[in-house]
Amino acid sequence: MSKRSYTFTHAITRKPGISVTEGLRAIDTGTPSLDLFLQHHADYVTALKSTGAEVTVLEPLEEFPDSVFVEDAALCLPEGAIAMRPGTPSRIGEAAVMTAVLKKLYNDVRVVEGPGFIDGGDILTTETEILVGTSARTDSAGIEELRALVADWGYTVRELETPEGVLHFKTDCSLLDENTILSTKRLADSGCFEGYNVIYVAEGEEPCANSIRYNDLVIMPDGFPQTEAILREAGYDVQKVGNTEAGKLDGGMSCLSLRFSPPA
Ligand code: CIR
């Protein structure tokens, strides 16, 4: 049976623009190269398409340097879409732009109006529940508003904590299938994934915890051989994509797309 938490027909991405060099970062490890970022982005879109996805590639939005990380602006569910309220001033305007895009695909688009904040990167949707981590970008008020917005679609929202110093909840975890989550030890050790099987990323390979399951593929950043071997051994079909440039801006595989199946 196909599973709604990782079986999708569509994805939305946005190409990085010239302004991506001004993107937010916790620690400056160098300016991303736009050319290499565009190459990685194209490889990412190719990986999604290889699973049968219809991928929308939006043009760059120069006024929003971080807008390549489309995941933070919305949450897409089979029943409808919800525009987020990104918790950092330079990104809050991305939600309205994404709302207009989503209205072409969904009849039901709901909006987190505030006063709380919530970034899509803090949300992990599993087969049975929506997990949301509080972080520097997401607060309890934002999570409460999301809870109210999805209640009539039958979703349970569980509030958790993103580890200190980690940008987003999903910086440290990914859904692999209906029972299994890929996680760092620092996150899973909090007990937040009780009831799920947890596969730990290899020690020293924490950045690859931000991977995605999209249809038959686990798409992971290139350069994490021990975790790649663990995933292959566990029976997953793995596709690697270069992520050095997005990584300089604390972004990874999940941040680069919205993944969904709009209502027929
Ligand atoms: C930011 O700080 O907002 C961007 N430089 C990175 C966003 C990554 N997005 C995500 O984890 N969902």
Image (cartoon, rainbow, N blue to C red):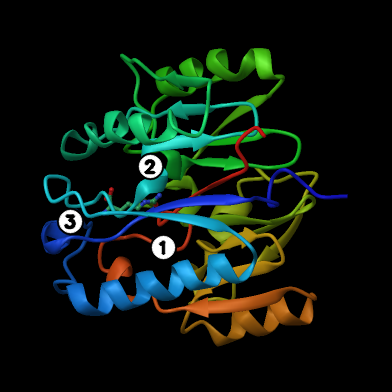
Q: Which residue is mark 2?
A: 72
Q: Tell me, yes or no, whether the two marked residues, 1 and 3, touch with CB atoms within 8 Å.
A: no
Q: Nearer the viewer, residue 225 or 184?
A: 225
Which residue, given by chain and number where applicable, does mark 3 sit on?
23
At label 3, the amino acid type is Gly
Residue at 45% in and 70% down: 44
Q: Can you tell which quarter of the image residue 119 is in?
A: top left
Answer few, some or many: residues within 10 Å of disc 1's Cα (few below 14, many 20 plus, some between 14 and 19): many
73 sits to left or right of 91: right
- In this rendering, is residue 108 above or below 184? above
Mark 1 vs ligand 1: CB below 8 Å: yes
Give the quadrant of the C terminus.
top right
Tell me how far mark 1 sits from mark 3, CA to CA.
14 Å
Q: Give the mark nearer the N terminus: 3 vs 2.
A: 3
Left or right: 113 as drawn, with respect to 263: left
Residue 73: name its quadrant.
top left
Q: Could you tell me which residue is drawn at 63 percent across and 59 percent down?
A: 214
User: Where is residue 83 shown, x and y percent of the image?
Assistant: 40, 28
Q: Is residue 39 above or below residue 131?
A: below
Image coordinates for residue 164, horizontal then vertical, percent: 39, 47
Q: Residue furthest right?
A: 1
Closer to the chain start, of discs 1 and 2, is 2
Label 1, on which residue?
252
Measure the alpha-carbon separation of dots 3 and 2: 14 Å
